[in-house]
Amino acid sequence: MPGSRTGGPPAQRPVRRPATPRPSRESGVLGLYLRARRGWDRPLTAYYLIFGGSLLITVLGLVMVYSASQITALQMSLPGSYFFRKQLLAAVIGAGLLFAASRMPVKLHRALAYPILAGAVFLMTLVQIPGIGVSVNGNQNWIAVGGSFQIQPSEFGKLALVLWGADLLARKQDKKLLTQWKHMLVPLVPAAFMLLGLIMIGGDMGTAIILTAILFGLLWLAGAPTRLFAGVLSIAAVLGLILIKTSANRMARLQCLGATEPQSGPVDCWQAVHGIYALASGGIFGSGLGASVEKWGQLPEAHTDFIFAVTGEELGLAGTLSVLALFAALGYAGIRVAGRTEDPFVRYAAGGVTTWITAQAVINIGAVLGLLPIAGVPLPLFSYGGSALLPTMFAIGLLIAFARDEPAARAALAMRQPRFGRKRGAGGTGSIRSPRRWNTMRRRASAARSSGER
């Protein structure tokens, strides 16, 4: 054995044991949770949820409108795809409005608040003029545009109240006037009551409930005290009770809560009960697309107010839970946008739109499930009706614009590079592949996050 340089025996080196792999901190369920948490906290999560959720709801709604409206169209001696084609046309126009709204700057959104409010009030006034307004199902809330096309101005009143109320509260907050309850209520509440009065003249209590929810949402975001909420809510409850007591139709709808037979005493609960029948016969995965039985004349308004019941019958519990999950994701994204912005107008407008869509979805689905009275409001982005689809898609465009305008989201969008692209060299002698920068987007965007970003 060779000795060492000093003449002594060679030093014995310790035998290295094979390294045992350490258990990964991100393995198993915990690792899946951590990866999901990091993905959920990315700057563009709200943007993708709003865009993807609204797109899926609209596309699934078009499919269900086509399935649910065929029998109704044939009974009216119309082509089977009649209502689907009208809804598809409205969706295409709405997609243009969504794209335009998503690309508008915030200043332009604020500038449109007063013109949209004035236009909505003007159209809602025209509805009450004989010869111009059209009555549908006992409600005088429509204007005939030409041919078979009609518009419902009260649907645009929701968008008008959101934009105008957000601009009003933002300007008052900049001037530090919201600490006084008079400035918080005036002129927001009187203007909302004016819109409610124009709607209730036509007898549409469902839309009036949605406008009331938007008003409460704006006041909540503005920091209204609890006693102020209690006062406004008490007044609204008294007015609602009077309106219900003075209308036999509204009283009948209230008495149909929990009904299990179509004829519950002197009250006809045909629509409410057959909506429950449709949901109950769907099972887990439904009877199949297009195989609904209730839409064959048993369920009134199968493609409008009660399209969720047809969805449950044809797509089953899995389909209805998917729709609920999409609306929940859309609501969460809207709350996230409203909570992480520093711009008061964006906060009020995003909160108002989220309140509008969430409240309308809850009221529609609750009525189909028999938990709430039938209010006659469509399911947002899902039910048939161009007058409801157009302002809703414009409102979704607002949320997309606000989600893109977050500082961290802007930084993430600016750093996105084409995955398969070429970048021209500085010397101009050809092109080389751009470096793979998408793997570092999370790390770089985290440094640019705003103070509210987690």
Image (cartoon, rainbow, N blue to C red):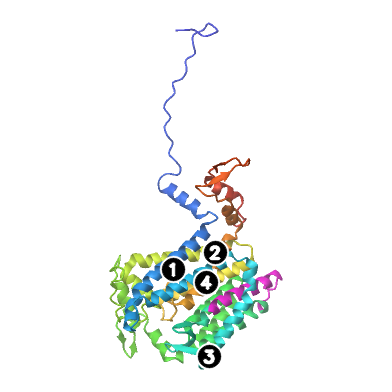
Q: CA distance from mark 1 to mark 3?
A: 32 Å
- Image disc number at residue 58: 1
Numbered disc in front, either 4 or 2? 2
Q: CA distance from mark 2 to mark 3?
A: 35 Å
- Residue at the image point whose x is 56% and y is 73% from the top: 217
Numbered-mark total: 4
Mark 1 vs 3: CB contact within 8 A? no
Q: Camera-side residue: 73 or 51?
A: 73
For badge 1, the amino acid type reads Thr
Query: Which residue carries the number 3 mark?
Result: 128
Query: Which residue carries the number 2 mark?
Result: 400
Dot 2 falls on a residue whose secondary structure is helix
Mark 4 vs 1: CB contact within 8 A? no
For badge 2, the amino acid type reads Ile
Q: Is residue 268 magenta?
A: no
Dot 4 falls on a residue whose secondary structure is helix
Q: Residue furthest top?
A: 7
- Residue at the image point whose x is 30% and y is 84% from the top: 262
Give the image location of residue 316, x and y in percent: 32, 68
N-term mark: 4 or 1: 1
Query: Which residue carries the number 4 mark?
Result: 355
Question: Counting other residues with Cα less than 10 Å from the Cα at mark 2, is it few (<14), some (14-19), or many (20 or more)?
Answer: many
Q: Camera-side residue: 65 or 172?
A: 65
